[in-house]
Image (spheres, rainbow, N blue to C red):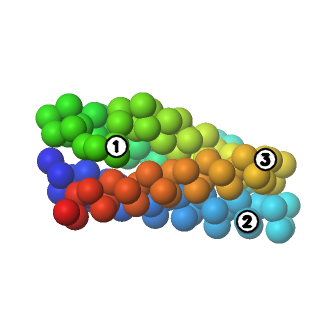
Amino acid sequence: MSEEILQLTKKLLNYNTLFMEYYNEARENGTTHDFHEVIKPFANEVNTAANEWAALMKNWLAKSPQKHLHPKQIDTTLEHIEQLSIQAFFPKTSKSRFLNANRTVEYFLLEILKELEK
């Protein structure tokens, strides 16, 4: 199970990097993508991976509680990922709010990697 979590966590970290790239591109160029052709399929892909990750994480934490990882953090991270996957395409999204959510996701995912690699 932890191998699956490790792979999904790395995948979500990659998505988180993509969120930043898409967001910066949207802000710099004012680019808007078609919702049904680009944004929705991307968000659905991200949400599928994120939901699978969240289910595995909750199961793992239930079986082997970690000192610095809690189920509430999983829910919060999942919410942030779902929001970021869509907000990344909109240049009018609040920059500070977007960056804070992005950093929060990155921090928590990196903490999970540290725990898994122990």
Please tell me how crowded label 1 is: few (under 14), some (14-19), or many (20+) other residues with Cα within 10 Å.
some
Please tell me how crowded label 2 is: few (under 14), some (14-19), or many (20+) other residues with Cα within 10 Å.
some
Q: Of helix, strand and loop, which one carries label 1? A: loop
Looking at the picture, how far across and down is residue 100, in whole percent?
66, 51
Q: Residue at x 33, y 54 (%)?
A: 112
Residue 69, label in figure: 1
Mark 1 belongs to which amino acid?
Leu
Relative depth, front residue between 41 and 54: 54
Q: Is residue 13 above or below residue 90?
A: below
Residue 93, label in figure: 3
Q: Residue at x 34, y 43 (%)?
A: 69
Residue 36 image-quadrant placement: top right
Please tell me how crowded label 3 is: few (under 14), some (14-19), or many (20+) other residues with Cα within 10 Å.
some
Cα distance, mark 2 to mark 1? 30 Å
* Marks 2,1: beta carbons within 8 A: no
Q: Of helix, strand and loop, which one carries label 3? A: loop
- Which residue, as the protein is rendered here, is positioned at the far front? 67
Which quarter of the rendering shows the C terminus? Answer: bottom left
